[in-house]
Image (cartoon, rainbow, N blue to C red):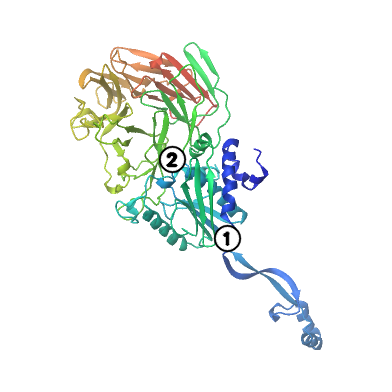
Amino acid sequence: MRLPATLAPWRQWLDWFDPEPAAALGDLLLRLHPLLGAFRLRALRGQVEPEGIDDLRRRGSYERLLLSEWALADAAPEEFDRRAAGGEHLFLSPKLIARQTDALTVAVFDSGPAQLGAPRLLHMAMWILLAQRAQAAKARFLWGVLGLPGELHAAEHASDPAQSLRELLDARAWRFRAEHGFAEAGQAGTGAARAALEQQWAQWLDAQQPSPGERWSIGAAASGFGLGHRIAIAAAGAGELAVTVSSAQARREARLALPDPKRASRLLRGQFVLKPQAAPAAEEIGPVRVVRVAERISLKQPPLLSANGLSVAVPLLDKQVVHLHRLTSKRRLGNPSVVHWTGPLLAAGIHAHVFGGVVAYSRPRAHPGVYPDGAPLPALSFQGLRGFVQGVRPELLNCSPDRGRWAPMAWVQASARDLGGRAEPKPELFVLESGNLWRWRPQDSDGNPAKFAPYAQQVLAMVAMHEAWIDYLRVRDGCVEVATTRPGQPGDSGRALAQARCPGQIQSGWLHGQRVRGGYRHSAAVELRLGGHGGERSALWRLLQWDGGAGSADFELILPSEWKVIGIDAPRDGGPALIAINPDRTAVMAIGENERRTLYQSGTRLTVGSVAAGGETIAVIDLQGRLVVLHERGVSTTIYAGGSDAEGDGDV
């Protein structure tokens, strides 16, 4: 990428971006750089030590007298004495150096509510400026966020240098948390909370060896110089930000115009590079459309479908990247949206064609809440989920995020009508893991992890209904029940919306929900391991359907265990049917009470699949790394043929 000569010092960092966002950031760098002043990194020096020989001199300690002079003392003692009296002896002069122990500069960014949005653009620019200053001084540069005292991050990742900058963008909080002990109840998010956090940072940095020579506080306006140098960012006129750089030596101010909103939005979303792509070539073969895409997808994670079946996401192989495809227009297919995340995903979901996920950190972090013995809990980070940033990780939520498959997740928000107009609707986040249905709300982020209880237990499946609430299938008192989180409706603590007696040990279950003729239809399939039905290698599936809570279908199917059930479907004009992959993994079948129908026949073995929990879409992945989407229960098919052979990543 060609850059103006004035931006040459920051080329290493601007090369991470496409030309347009790089130009936008470059303008900010040029305006901010003069405000920083002279570099004042304090050189930390150890004791003076000799290193080699610097010169020969006529003065010095006789311990460093040349050997040839000592030889003269043995051969001609009188000459030796004469040379000593005349100051003619030669001595070794060592080279003395004071070693620099470790030069270090630290920047702490305020990721709180006052800095959300446009100020984060200046955070990115300051991150680059300080990283370049430290590199030029042969120093280390580390950064952290104000809300997590003592947690520092390196400037670059070996695999993806720009990943650290994306982590900075993802480190945002809607309020500061009170459980650190820095604020009284009701003070979270105030200037007092920020000042207390800065004090914690200062105490922690003072205790480090070496202590950082240059310390920067970047964020909202406050009194004093922060950790040493303060950069205060605040809104000014329309499309402008006011920046004040203050220290004990100087104070400088400026007003900076913001970049074009489109470029700024790309930067804030972490979309630094958009690879130029032509529209995917779509080949029509009867009812099948083959769409060519370049990337290889993972074969382990089943395709992630939105509840309505209009969006599908697949992770790319060996990358923290997702391709999100929109399926609403079957004949006009565009490039997928590219979504990055910053850690191992524990759960994921799609809401209104927006991919969101829960990142579970495997190492302890400075995070609100601790185990009873005082050890910090691993944190949860919510990405792409409006209204959520970080959350408590309950003790029972102990699954590994590296297992290769994401737990089901749903982001929902009730409407004002659902609440009777009594209150402003708040979003809710639900994650289903190992039979426990967890709920997070914005007001629950300060909960005690040790007391964070599941919203419901013995839950088999869930489905987001109209993106406003979820209905879920659970087991209770020998019954399978459909319950709901819809405000004003019977939920976990009341009676079920629908139920059926179900004796036997239930192994797994699926749920499908849709609106039919002004009411709601729920279809469920539960798997029971029972003897006497085809042998122990067979599974008994019981399929149930309720219209408005009244039972309309109830029958059993026996399938050999070699079949791979991937969900349940419920056409509006027919009964429920299992959707399964046959034992040779070459066909997707719909198995109902009275028929078996082939929805898709494949020449390549299939690995994993999914069924939309509230729509008419089915998606599977084959061993060639192709995503196969069946629209309207197989009426038409789209195959996203990407990459090449992905051996070793299958899960058949």
Residue where numbered disc 2 is placed = 344
| Label 1 crowd bin: few (<14), some (14–19), many (20+), radius 10 Å | few
- Residue situated in front as seen by the camera: 176 or 257: 257
- Residue situated in front as seen by the camera: 432 or 73: 432
> Closer to the camera: disc 1 or disc 2?
1
Q: Earlier in the sequence, mark 1 or mark 2?
A: 1
Q: Which percent across, then down, holds residue 294?
A: 55, 27
Residue 499 figure quarter: top left
| Label 2 crowd bin: few (<14), some (14–19), many (20+), radius 10 Å | some
Q: Residue at (75%, 74%) from the top-left corner?
A: 56
Residue where numbered disc 1 is placed = 40
Instruction: Identify whether 45 is placed above or below 241.
Output: below
Amino acid type for the residue under numbered disc 2: Pro
**Can you see residue 33?**
yes
Residue lying farthest to the top in this orientation: 286
Amino acid type for the residue under numbered disc 1: Arg
> How many numbered markers are drawn?
2
Instruction: Identify whether 264 is placed above or below 326.
Output: below
Q: Residue at (30%, 43%) from the top-left corner?
A: 443
Q: Residue at (42%, 55%) from the top-left corner?
A: 149
- Residue situated in front as seen by the camera: 590 or 40: 40
**Can you see residue 402?**
no
Q: Which percent across, then down, holds residue 393?
A: 34, 44
Disc 1 from disc 2: Cα separation: 39 Å
Residue lying farthest to the front in this orientation: 237
Helix, strand or loop at disc 1? Answer: loop
Q: Which percent across, then down, holds residue 585?
A: 42, 21
Helix, strand or loop at disc 2? Answer: loop
Left or right side of 350 for 492: left
